[in-house]
Amino acid sequence: MTSSLTSKNLIRLFGLGGIIYFPDYPGNPLNAPTASFLSSTGLPHDRIFTSTHLDLNLDESNPVTLGLLMDLEGGEVPRARRSWPVLGSLRTATIAVDTESGAVHSYPEGENTSQVLHRDIESFVFCLAEYRKLRDAKTEDSDNEMLIHSFRTAVSAFDPTPLADEDSDWNLMLDEIHDGLW
């Protein structure tokens, strides 16, 4: 990861209370770049993305795992993914991170299979920041096509993965804006 995002820039977009920092500790299951990014830059938390980190006891350094969450919800997950940390929820999908590769996966509600949503945590946070900019710029009179195009251009230049699948969470949210649903 070559961090082009800073904690300061995220705080400007989401406010100080809108950034969650994850502790980096000995034995952290995340790969080093992911752990470093989450502890130094942070993860936005707002009405589009809700972090599960807020639900944890602050004395607990281990995040909620995908295996634990799927057990609670009656779902199944491959053994190799059971230890993946759950970052939170994006709309109606659970967001988890692969501890080895750092790729961010989306598990749509009611599904046991995932979709690679981002190549890494930096891409995920970049997308959240760009989506926040889109939401902040949107007014009743705004040109939704232009806003969507700007978002797509910025995100695709950074990482084409989030928009590669027409059924990705990001494309579904953009479709709702395009259709005037919000």
Image: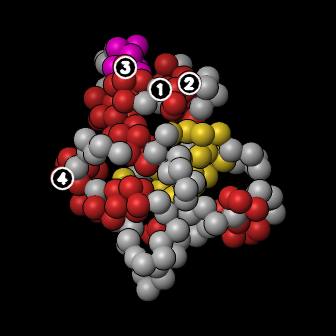
The residues tagged by marks 4 and 1 sit, at their Cα atoms, a distance apart of 25 Å
Q: Are marks 1 and 2 in contact (CB under 8 Å)?
A: yes
Mark 4 residue crowding within 10 angstroms, few (<14) / some (14–19) / many (20+): few
Which tag, 4 or 3, sits closer to the chain's start?
Answer: 4
Q: Is residue 66 above or below residue 60?
A: above
- Tell me which residue sits at (46%, 45%) in the image: 120
Q: Amino acid at mark 4?
A: Lys
The residues tagged by marks 2 and 4 sit, at their Cα atoms, a distance apart of 29 Å
Span shown in magenta: 145-152
Mark 1 residue crowding within 10 angstroms, few (<14) / some (14–19) / many (20+): some
Q: Which residue is mark 1?
A: 160
Residue 84 in sight here: yes
The residues tagged by marks 4 and 3 sit, at their Cα atoms, a distance apart of 23 Å
The residues tagged by marks 3 and 2 sit, at their Cα atoms, a distance apart of 13 Å
Q: Position of residue 69 (x, y in %)?
A: 68, 65
Which tag, 2 or 4, sits closer to the chain's start?
Answer: 4
Q: Amino acid at mark 1?
A: Pro
Left or right: residue 6 versus residue 116 is left
Left or right: residue 51 versus residue 78 is left
Can you tell which quarter of the image residue 1 is in? top left
The disc label shown at residue 24, or none: none
- Tell me which residue sits at (47%, 26%) in the image: 160
Which tag, 4 or 1, sits closer to the chain's start?
Answer: 4
Q: Main secondary structure of the magenta part?
A: helix
Of 6 and 88, nearer the camera is 6
Of 110 and 160, nearer the camera is 160
Tag in front: 2 or 4: 2
